Image (cartoon, helix red, strand yellow):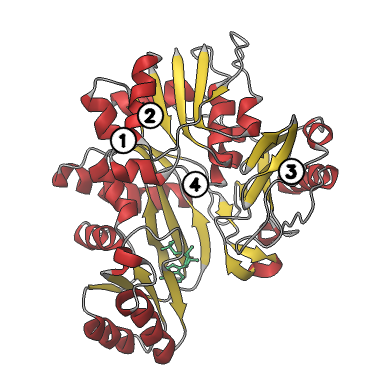
Amino acid sequence: MKLLVIGSGGREHALVWKLAQSPHAEKIFCAPGNAGIQQERTEKTEQPVECVNIGAENLPGLLAFAQEQKVDFTVVGPDNPLALGIVDLFQKHGLKIWGVNQQAAQFESSKVFSQKFMEKYGIPTAAAGTFSEAGKAKAFCASLGGKCVVKADGLALGKGVLICTNQAEAEKAVDEIMVSKAFGEAGASVVIQEFLEGIEVSLHALCDGKTAKIFPTSQDHKRALDGDLGLNTGGMGTYSPTPFLNDAQLADVAAKVLEPFMHGCVAEGIDYRGLLYPGVMLTKNGPKILEFNARFGDPETQVYLTRLENDLVELLDASVSGTLDKIELKWRPEASVCVVMASGGYPGNYAKGKAINGLEAANALPGVKVFHAGTAFKDGQIVTNGGRVLGVTALGKDLRAAQAAAYAAVECIQFEGAQFRRDIAVKAF
Ligand code: AMP
């Protein structure tokens, strides 16, 4: 099979790495990819993975490439091409592609859509209101005592969520999003949720339109600095499993969330085939959904795919063809920890083009896989090329062993300005 993976981050490197292990994968292309992806080979045919310089949002370019190369199966990593309708476009041209269609992508591209859906189908979520008028939005914030979370409706690069502790902050947040339009049209309407306290975990479920198969739990670390301080980022590290839900509790959450979700999709005529990634707060009143994402998490994918035993080509194929009920997900018993190494200054301004050393030594450590995110080749040397640069991932017999292995690998790697958190997985201990 010829495969095409769309995207260029750590998530896509993990997808390519895992797909390359499948006996079905004869050739893999990645658009646009990165330096680490370019170093992978398919296990069966030992074909190098080929990166092609087509952006993930260039839908006509991707379609033409897939047709030209007679790609058998395309796998989409990021949310933007899904929200733009890449799945619908490829399917219209008779091409097989994995990811949610444009209608299903609304769960991520519109928080108002998601909130209304959750309320209609009884999915546990925060008390909330949706508004397209600033005055009414502010009045609702006041009814929550100002302790609330104001969310721009549309995609805002993960920045459109403002946590407020009093009414003055809440009014400022509403003005920023709805009046000053800090996130453009994404802020034409807002969801305002009560502020929830608890432990936040990431869930992932692979869906095929009828069946949803839940993954073990994982936990992301969104803030830039140790102790959950500093600015919000795309994610500075993850680990799996988490100690916060045992198997029975996870099954209970799945029943409370996935069953009404899949039922609601069928009722609304939404064909949900792809990955569902709910952000969940485990509160003293039970699990509450904060948001839905409609694709694999980054860096959750790095810890999930290092633990996954199934053939990923077969899994994604079953997700497209509606046969997931015949497959059992199998996970290695080991724990996995991913530590993100970022450019100095991230998530603010940062420099690119810094030489990265020590990658071979890190990858040679037992259980370690260094996934690349923002990297490129320059004059034969691997250099930094983004905010999040590497996802240093390690398996270990338990979380402590995995954490020790991941940090031992981080110590092998140097680039100017490198920053990373030193407390990934500490919450589990
Ligand atoms: P979202 O993009 O909606 O997941 O929000 C981004 C982050 O804001 C989440 O990962 C949470 O840490 C936080 N957050 C969102 N909604 C709430 C809420 N209702 N209560 C407390 N924290 C929240």
Residue 297 has which mark?
4
Q: Is residue 304 left or right of residue 395?
A: left
Name which residue type carries label 1: Ile
* Contact? badges 1 and 2 (CB < 8 Å): yes
Instruction: Label 1, secondary structure: give it.
Output: helix
Label 1 belongs to which residue? Answer: 86
Name which residue type carries label 3: Ala
Q: Residue at x 44, y 12 (%)?
A: 1
Reading the chain from its start, which is encountered first: label 3 or label 1? 1
Instruction: Label 3, secondary structure: give it.
Output: helix
- Give the spatial CA distance, label 2 vs label 4: 22 Å
Residue 402 has which mark?
3
Instruction: Label 2, secondary structure: give it.
Output: helix
Q: Residue at x 34, y 73 (%)?
A: 181
On the image, the x and y values in percent for residue 69 come to: 41, 14
Give neighbour class at mark 4: few <14, some 14-19, many 20+ (Cα, 10 Å).
Answer: many
Give neighbour class at mark 2: few <14, some 14-19, many 20+ (Cα, 10 Å).
Answer: many
On the image, the x and y values in percent for residue 188 come to: 26, 69
